[in-house]
Image (spheres, coloured by chain):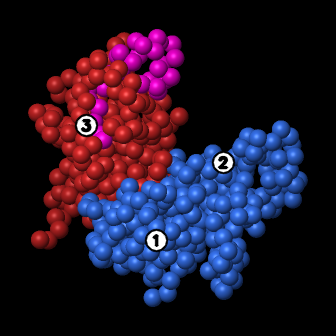
Amino acid sequence: MDVIMHSSSFLLPKLYQPVNKPVKNYALVVLNQHLPRFMPRLWDHANLRICADGGANHIFDEMYQITNDEDKKSTRNKYVPEIIEGDMDSIRPEVKLFYSSQGSKISDKSHNQETTDLHKCISRIHHCTPDDEKPNLCVLVTGALGGRFDHEAANINVLYLFSDMRIVLLSDDCLIRLLPRTHRHELYIESSVEGPHCGLFPVGAPSTSTTTTGLKWNLSESKMRFGSMISTSNIVQSEKVTVESDADLLWTISLRNLT
Amino acid sequence: MAPTAPTQRPTMRHSSAFLLPSTAPSSPAPGPDDAAVALVVLNQPLPRFAPLLWSRAAVRVCADGGANRVFDGMPALLPGQDPDEVRASYKPDVIKGDMDSVRPEVKEHYSNLGTRIVDESHDQDTTDLHKCIAFIAENYSATNKSNLSILVLGALGGRFDHEMGNINVLHLFPSINIVLLSDDCLIFLLSKMHTHEIHVEKSIEGPHCGLIPIGMPSTSTTTTGLRWNLDNTSMSFGGLISTSNIVEEDKVTVTSDSDLMWTTSLRK
């Protein structure tokens, strides 16, 4: 079985990248919720930044508060997304005008009410990325968790619908990734920025056999199912965690207080 | 054993009337025929309607650090009132859990007022919510269980493994009506063993809603009362799930071969 290696080095400052790990190409998608406090770090890593509709309001309003820059205007000029995409029912007109004048491409998808804003953004990235570059691409998403539960569920479903892409959903408290059952997974833990709390969840369908290494309570061909046992409040105990399962699993790890 | 045909399943009725503002001048105590409401407060900031739900509840349980949230948060939600008076009148009946988050002075304050402190630090196998639900189910079984609703604050958002663990508690107690609430939405489990009638309080809930098959795909779900109804429709992660749906009627019905999470948005 092929191995997928996962690493959260995007949470480290760009200068402090670990040696001997493949350099990833990052894209950033900003959804319509308050920005996590480490947003500048994600922005720095990304080669492509897409605001989904009202996500642009949050960049406009909150970036200078997070960076503590005194000059609001120059901060706004510095953090300009390449693309603003979605049905445009949340973005404020003055915000859209500002970014448009700064060179952001406005991609109005209001005719398409079938898919969520995140789905549209991921679909665009999926479409524009050649297959041989997909393994090297990691899409970082902020604002996908919390808020309305149906939005959160739809955002998690995007991970399943685009399971050939590496997508990470981030909040102030944690990150989540999908670990497809088609591969063995090696998760390289950056313990200065993530952990120790973690978990594994068979959200789509039960697992009859999951095996892990590197956790305080490892699974050994264990069954997992909602309504029975799922792995919550587990603890990362090694720099490398491995997971192999007969079911697609959601992996989550808590984030340390990143400033 | 063959699955029960949809028409043979008993109907379970759901209502969010507990969220309606009280029209009486003082907090109404639940009458003998009313649904009994229990409130569990977990360790996250209180939603804005916490005082209303507190007044509706016959019993209030704080899970560990949830007691901090009540101590700090209730006076903040009731700024016109004296904080000490608020803390005295919004006093939990029980503080339960492993006690690693509740501040010592908060624990002592409520203990002095008569709150029962139940230390479960020896039990690390179950989550705080699990312990609280089990406790309420055991201690208040005098109440007709089918009339009991357990409302939970602070179960959503925050650490995702906590949220998943809390959702799993709904699956572990499928015969108890447990509702998880946040500022933005509420969720509860629709067990496959029943046909469900959901009475939507349109003044406070909706219009957005969703049906989500957590843990198991659904091969057949049928609904009425939604803008985009399901008709023997399959749902699964990796396929279709019903999100950003709209409640059209006051009554929504759901029948499914699989357990589903129902969610509605809450109006601001």
Judging from the image, mark 2 belongs to the subunit labelled: A
Judging from the image, mark 3 belongs to the subunit labelled: B
- Residue A16 seen in the figure: yes
Identify which residue, A134 or B199, lies in the foreground.
Answer: A134
* Pointer 1 residue: A241
* Pointer 3 residue: B119
Task: Based on the picture, tell me whether residue B133 belongs to the magenta stretch.
Answer: no
Please identify which colour was used for chain A in the image.
blue
Identify which residue, B181 or B132, lies in the foreground.
Answer: B132
* Pointer 2 residue: A259
Task: Based on the picture, tell me whether residue B82 belongs to the magenta stretch.
Answer: yes
Q: Is disc 3 placed on a helix, strand or loop?
A: strand
Label 2: few (<14), some (14–19) or many (≥20) C-alpha neighbours in 10 Å: few
**Disc 1 or 2, which lies upstream in sequence?**
1
Q: Which contiguous range is marked in magenta? A: B71-98
Q: Is residue A221 above or below residue B232?
A: below
